[in-house]
Image (cartoon, rainbow, N blue to C red):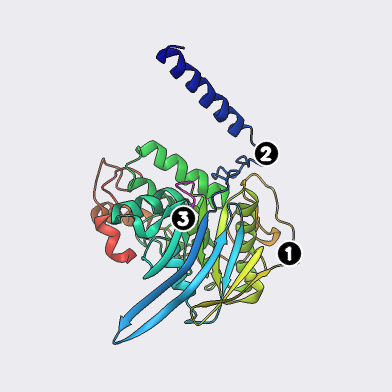
Amino acid sequence: MTPDSTDAAAESADAGESASDDAGVGDTTADDTGVGSATADDTPAVSLVDVRKTYRLGEPVHALDGVSFTAPRGSYTAVMGPSGSGKSTLMNLVGCLDTPTAGAVVVDGRDVAALSADGKARLRAESVGFVFQTFNLMPRLTAAENVALPLVFRDRPRREREQRARELLTRVGLGDRADHRPSELSGGQRQRVAIARALTNEPDLLLADEPTGNLDAETGIEIMALFERLHRAGNTILMVTHERHVAEHAERIVHVLDGRIERIETVAQRRPITGPVTEDTDGIGREDAGANGHGNGIDDERTDSSGREDEAGELRRNVGEGDGSGSPIGSAADGVSGSDAEGR
């Protein structure tokens, strides 16, 4: 057999293996959420092996002390513990915001400690979505502009940013709030915007740090219904909470105490969402009490929007004209320098 024919045979074999992989059992396809879902892959979404994190503030503080656990792709895991137990440190390590003192943190098959600063940033942008307790929305930007920010930093075209942002807002039930600022939205609506922003780059892994901590009970139920829908779509969810009733929505609960894993609990009967999670045209579904397309089932705490024209002018002055749109949807340079200080 000639070298050329050998190469051709090898390529044919590779193609056959690829086709076999594509037809693999258990592949999860994306549904109407439009969110990238997990595939059948032996590589876990997250793996921690004997992870230690020590801060030196005079005396050394051992925030994490020999933590090991694995989150399979498509799993729903809650990390539960009291304040100061190491939950947030663990989340920062998995989110590539910090580096372990010892041990291995592997996210999407990549060892975080081995990555450069640019490598960590790339991994965060491509594979991880963050949802915070305090929402962390840019106050001068509209809901759509906040959702578009991840695409700004990836230099995506203006039309793509706008389309993606409005599509995601519609799917979390805020299509008619796309042009409202955070101050014009209730707490539940702000958290929906934050979740939409976390989904912008179609991450496989969602990290949620006390996502219902600043919400009333009814609104918290709706946000948990939204996470349940995302989990059904195949996303891997790792959620930090100190509330048992929130943790019971997950499949497993990792109990953390004094920087160590106390135990890992399999939830025998997951807490149901009060009321059905509707499979409506928004594509993600939500608890019936808030399924009116206006957010969260409580009275909206919006301010009067009669001054929107003046606010739009202020936004253009503070963020920059860019290509004339005055928003991060319009220009990759917009929404970075002018609003950065307010987002920190």
Dot 2 crowding, Cα within 10 Å, few <14, some 14–19, many 20+: few
Sequence order check, earlier mark of 2 and 3: 2
In-image side of 295 versus 60 (left or right): right
Q: Which residue is mark 1?
A: 272
> As drawn, which residue projects farthest toward the front?
1
Q: Which mark is residue 52?
A: none
What range is drawn magenta here? Answer: 197-202
Q: Position of residue 21 (x, y in %)?
A: 59, 34
Place of residue 182 in the rendered image (x, y in percent of width and height, measured from the top left): 43, 62
- Judged from the image, the secondary structure of the residue bearing numbered disc 2 is loop
Is residue 184 magenta-colored?
Answer: no
Q: Which residue is mark 3?
A: 107
Residue 172: x, y in percent?
56, 52
- Please tell me whether mark 3 sits on a helix, a strand or a loop: strand
- The answer to whether residue 331 is left or right of residue 29 is left
Residue at mark 2 to residue at mark 3: CA–CA distance: 23 Å
Q: Is 128 situated above or below 90?
A: above
Say what amino acid the circle numbered 3 marks: Val
Kind of residue at badge 1 = Pro
Of tags 1 and 2, the one toward the viewer is: 2
Question: Disc 3, disc 1: CB below 8 Å?
Answer: no
Cβ–Cβ below 8 Å for labels 2 and 3? no
Residue that appears at 26% across and 40% down: 323
Distance between the alpha carbons at the discs numbered 3 and 1:
29 Å
Which mark is first along the chain, 1 or 3? 3
Residue underneath mark 2: 25
The 10 Å Cα crowd at callout 1, few under 14, some 14 to 19, many 20 or more, is: some
Q: CA distance from mark 1 to mark 2?
A: 29 Å
